[in-house]
Amino acid sequence: MSSVIELDDVWYGYDREKPVLNGVSLQIRQGEFVAVIGGNGSGKTTLAKHCNGLYKPSKGSVKVNGCDTKTMSTAELARTVAYCYQNPDHQIFHSTIAAEVSFGPKNMGWPAEKIEQAVNEALEAVGLGGMGEAEPYFSSKGTRQKIAVASILAMKPQVIVLDEPTTGLDYRGMLEMMELVRRLHAAGHTIIVITHDMRLVAEYAERVLVMHRGSLVCDGDPQSVFAAPDILASAQVEAPAVYRFGEAAGMKGPLPLTLQQMTQKIAGGGQWR
């Protein structure tokens, strides 16, 4: 897979004496589903905001499809990498859902017919087809989150960054949101999710980046990352409950990360030390 985002020795700080990112280097490949985890203040969000040019590195470089973000405007970068904030109300400011979702395409100078098609497609993709004239502020938190996703989806970005997409949602809302994200990934979008929810990481992510004090301390698939207890402890991250149960129960081989994996392992028999 080709690289869509590349960070090379990226340093960044609001205060020169206290950098928030310390020489981070990594590549995000086209079509990946990446989770960024770590404790509060670890640099997760700062790292993610470098991916679409909301922040520009103090030192080092960030390239999107081979172009240095320092030479590109935020509007240009938004066409490739879209950012969905943790609180959808920080993105919603129009009186109707359709007007909200059409904001990005209009600012990109698209013709009216193309805008209408993009809005309809985006609303259908998030399960809000036919609701364009509804008022977003009277919607549930889960629906407002979907509106925010539709707003960035209408611009047809290559990469979608979601900051804590399930915060404040009940279990059903969380499932609906993550199944939406899974569909977007299956449709070809590169997904980057910032999250504290290790169950989400175990269930959906293909690759996990662990941040600690502004440094990338671990980069691998969920199974290998959750099998590094010392790194997780230092980064103030705990493996999913299912994984910890399997470890405490003395299960053999790769420990289950999800309830489905746990059920399959138990049903398989002979899985105990």
Image (tube, rainbow, N blue to C red):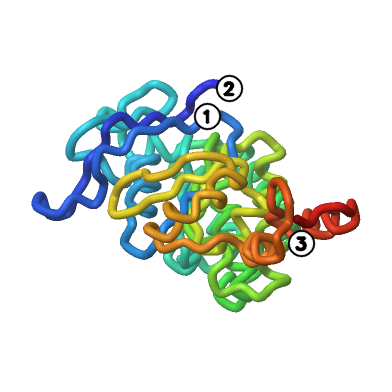
Q: Is residue 239 above or below residue 32?
A: below
What is the x, y in percent for residue 150?
60, 53
Q: Quadrant of residue 144?
A: bottom right
Residue lying at 46% horizontally and 45% vertically, measured from the top left: 209
Q: Amino acid at mark 1?
A: Arg
Residue 93 location, x and y as percent? 46, 66
- Amino acid type at mark 3: Leu
Which residue corresponds to mark 3? 259
The image quarter in which residue 154 lies: top right
* Label 3, label 1: how far apart the Cα atoms are: 29 Å
Q: Which mark identifies residue 44?
A: none
Given the image, on which type of amino acid does mark 2 rest? Met
Picture disc at residue 1? 2
Earlier-in-chain disc, 2 versus 1: 2
Q: Earlier in the sequence, mark 3 or mark 1?
A: 1
Looking at the image, do the residues carrying marks 3 and 1 touch, with CB atoms under 8 Å apart?
no
Assess disc 3: are there few (<14), some (14-19) or many (≥20) residues with their C-alpha within 10 Å of its C-alpha.
Answer: some
| Residue 112 visible (yes or no) | no
Which of the 4 image quadrants contains residue 68? top left
Query: Across the whole image, how many numbered discs are drawn on residues?
Result: 3
At mark 3, the secondary structure is helix
Residue at the location (63% across, 76% down)?
A: 140
The residue drawn where x is 37% and y is 58% is 234
Q: Residues within 10 Å of mark 2 (few under 14, many from 20)?
A: few
The answer to whether residue 104 is left or right of residue 252 is left
Determine whether the residue tagged by mark 1 lies in a helix, strand or loop: strand
